Image (spheres, helix red, strand yellow):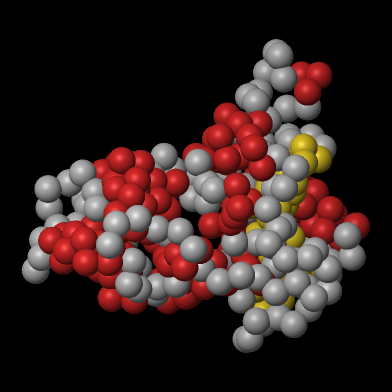
Amino acid sequence: MRLLNTKTLELKYFAQSPEEAYAILSHTWGEDEVLFSDAENLSSGLWNSWSLAKTLSAEKIRAAAALAASRRFRYIWVDTCCIDKSSSTELSEAVNSMFKWYQAARICFAYLSDVNPPEESQTKGVSFQNARWFSRGWTELIAPPEVEFYDAEWKLLGDRSSLVDVIHHTTKVHRNLLRPVRPRDWYSWYPSGPVVDEYPVSEIFIWAKSRETTRGEDIAYCLMGLFGVNMPLLYGEGKENALLRLQRNIISSCNDHSILLHADSAPLAKSLSEFNYKCSKEVRGTLGHSDRQFLLLLLCNANRVQ
């Protein structure tokens, strides 16, 4: 794992998970981001000498680093420049580790570049709930112990707890996952495990189905950590095959058969759009019946996989 020094903006490699607390920047990618190849041998002067688009990206990183430094963090993780995406091995390891990295961070700064300050929101930009950030891959919404949201001018909009109702309305993610579940003692915080233990798999798929990713396969890959599964990245396999592999891994690693309750006639869903709240309610409703009836329903759906 690599982290960016918040003072010098130099990268540091950690062979093991860093013991020192660190922050994370969550954002949506622009057209010309500062990548690992840019930051690897970067001198401080180069942060001010790029093209306009690259300079805007650099300014975003500088602002996030400054914010982290003001909160006494020596390191921050930024996905654009802390992963060498030219290495398929490193990229696969990073994607499989992403959920744990977000869990281990002390705080996540979510930068909503298309949300302008309130006084400008009537003339340009979008509202908080319509931010592009909410339509992208979303590990960072749930995994970190705390998330703070900032607008395009780096003004604080609120944190995940104070904005719980609007976030729930926008994402459908359960409110309990958006609030701290343990006392917020900054130095004794230990992140929780995957949410699949508390919510049906089918419901988590419902939360994810409105998300978009640049590469189709990432809609499945970004969910791996939520379910505590690992699998190799096979870019080129297509979104459908990636999702099918994810479902098979989930079935083999947990006892939640709600994954079989979807609208598709095939054993496993080929698209997240096949999951809906009717399926989810079917699971919850069945739980109220006798164990025998529930078992029969599971066996009925399990036979579709054979």
Taking 277 as reference, is 139 left or right? right
Residue 281 image offset from top left, x and y in percent: 34, 46
- Identify the residue at image location x=90%, y=57%: 70
Residue 126, placed above or below residue 135: above
Q: Quadrant of the C terminus?
A: bottom left
Q: Quadrant of the N terminus?
A: bottom right
Residue at the far front in the pictured view: 290
Taking 96 as reference, is 296 left or right? left
All told, the count of numbered labels is 0
Asked if residue 11 shows in the view, the reply is no
Residue 250 image offset from top left, x and y in percent: 32, 69
Foreground residue among 79 and 271? 271
Foreground residue among 172 and 235? 172
Residue 274, placed above or below residue 34: above
- Identify the residue at image location x=35%, y=41%: 277
- Identify the residue at image location x=36%, y=52%: 284
Residue 207, placed above or below residue 113: below
